[in-house]
Amino acid sequence: MTKKIFAGLSFLILYVFFFVVAGNAQTAKNVILLIGDGNGFNSEYAGTYYRYGDAGKQRYQSFPVALACTTYSRTSKDVKLPASVTGYDPKVFWETVANGTQSTEFTKTTDSAASSTAIHGGIKTSNGKIGMTYDKKIIELISEIAAKHGKKTGTVTTVPMSHATPAGFSVHEAERGDLQTIFLKMVAETSPLSVVMGCGHPFYERGKPIKIKDNEEEKEKIKRFSCVGGEKNWEIMKSGTLNNFKVIETKNQFEELAAGKGIIPDKVIGVVRCHGDIPPVDGNLDDVTSTQELLDKNYKKTDWNQLPSLSTMSLAALNVLTQNNSNGFVLMIEGGAIDHANHGRNIESSVLEHTGFSKTVDTVIDWVEKNSSWQETLVIVTADHETGQIWGPATFDDDNKNGVYDEGDSFNAFRQVQNNGRGKIPGVQYCSGGHTNALVPLYAKGIGADLFLKQIKGTDQKAAQFWNFSGQFVDNTDIFHVIKTVIVP
């Protein structure tokens, strides 16, 4: 009898041991989420054709998890979102380009605020809301969850620091346009963030000083300082510190931090010398001389020697987040101006922005393999939504010659982006200057990446044929749930 009890206890101990080990097997020390804002599948193809001259050549495109993701937001109606509502119907979408912004009674095409909230908060909200429900109830964001478990967190972006995508990582605000309030919350003493990097400098544009008018109107003055928390807050930041954040702004400071030189602070605000978007500093192709000409053409009046690349900023952030930190981190990196290029229906800018973003993903991959491992770090590459409704040439006949598909134009067929070779601008046709409901790509590798395979919401067979993948898709809220699962022991 004693032997049976001992054997039973031994089995129980072994069971508990293996259960605990198995339960922790998917726990990630680090998570790095890279978001190409506005980067749908065809934008991804265009950028890859430009950089490599062939599809599927990006390193992250060979990640073991390669899926699509739905991005729709919800309406503001005071009703419960039915579980059966997906907000994306493949059959409807592939009927005509006119259905690129399909909606239902409960859903609509997202903006970056709602999509960022979905990605970082796990719920569908209405457009314009940051870190809260459609009816303004506060939700817990992934940065706050990470901080509660001892992890450091940070955001890096090529657009102003308090824009919707980085804001949705850590802030709760009813109006995405209140940039000043959002920034102050991001850098408050109570903020979960240790790194905030991006644009919004009040006195520089693309590396060059901005000329200040003596009679500048008050509203312009407010706008100038909005992304750094207002004029008074900027005066404090100029001293070099704010709420225990070290403030940096020069290219040399970013590069030294990226190289790990000197004393690495625990918290950093990096204000790039650019009021609007940072041009893609490393959007060039090293052995294609015409690339720099293309950069200069699309980003006029730029002092390239004053601006850090997104890769440099990301390495700087990684050094801060790993300094005196054994608990790991969660970092969100945004290539934010792909969206702006596609809003402007500028394929040249789009592929240059995409090149800078994809090089940053390469930098992150190298960092993981040199400084961490895929057994302790999860890397996710995706987009918050598609912008521009990009297709191949002759998708529609632009009968009224206004550059977008609208009433009176003739839809022909969905056509592939045209590959014109490496360093050549691919052939595309923009059907819109806005956001669409199209699927966006999602790639994942590392600890817990396989959890996305348990979140499949459906299969789009037409997308599978068109973009050469399984056609399976998850929802952007699943990104939050996967990250939460892997960072909570």
Image (cartoon, rainbow, N blue to C red):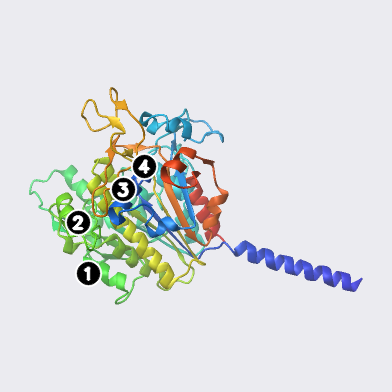
Secondary element type, mark 3: helix
Residue closest to the far top: 408
* Viewer-nearest of discs 3 and 1: 3
Query: Between disc 1 and disc 4, whose residue precedes?
Result: 1
- Of the numbered discs 2 and 4, the one sitting upstream in the chain is 2
Mark with earlier residue (3, 1): 3
The residue pinned by badge 3 equals 46
Q: Identify the residue under disc 2.
A: 291
- The answer to whether the residue labelled 2 contacts the one labelled 4, judged by CB atoms less than 8 Å apart, is no
Marks 3/4: CA distance?
13 Å
Cβ atoms at labels 2 and 3 below 8 Å apart: no
Name which residue type carries label 4: Glu
Which numbered disc, 3 or 4, marks the residue that appears first in the sequence? 3
Q: Which residue is mark 1?
A: 252
Considering depth in this image, is 230 or 312 the residue closer to the camera? 312
Q: Is residue 189 above or below residue 410?
A: below
Secondary element at image label 1: helix
Kindly report the distance in space between the C-alpha atoms of the residues bearing marks 1 and 4: 34 Å
180, 158: nearer the viewer: 158
Q: Position of residue 289 (x, y in %)?
A: 17, 60
State the image quarter where residue 304 is shown: bottom left
Amino acid residing under circle 2 = Thr
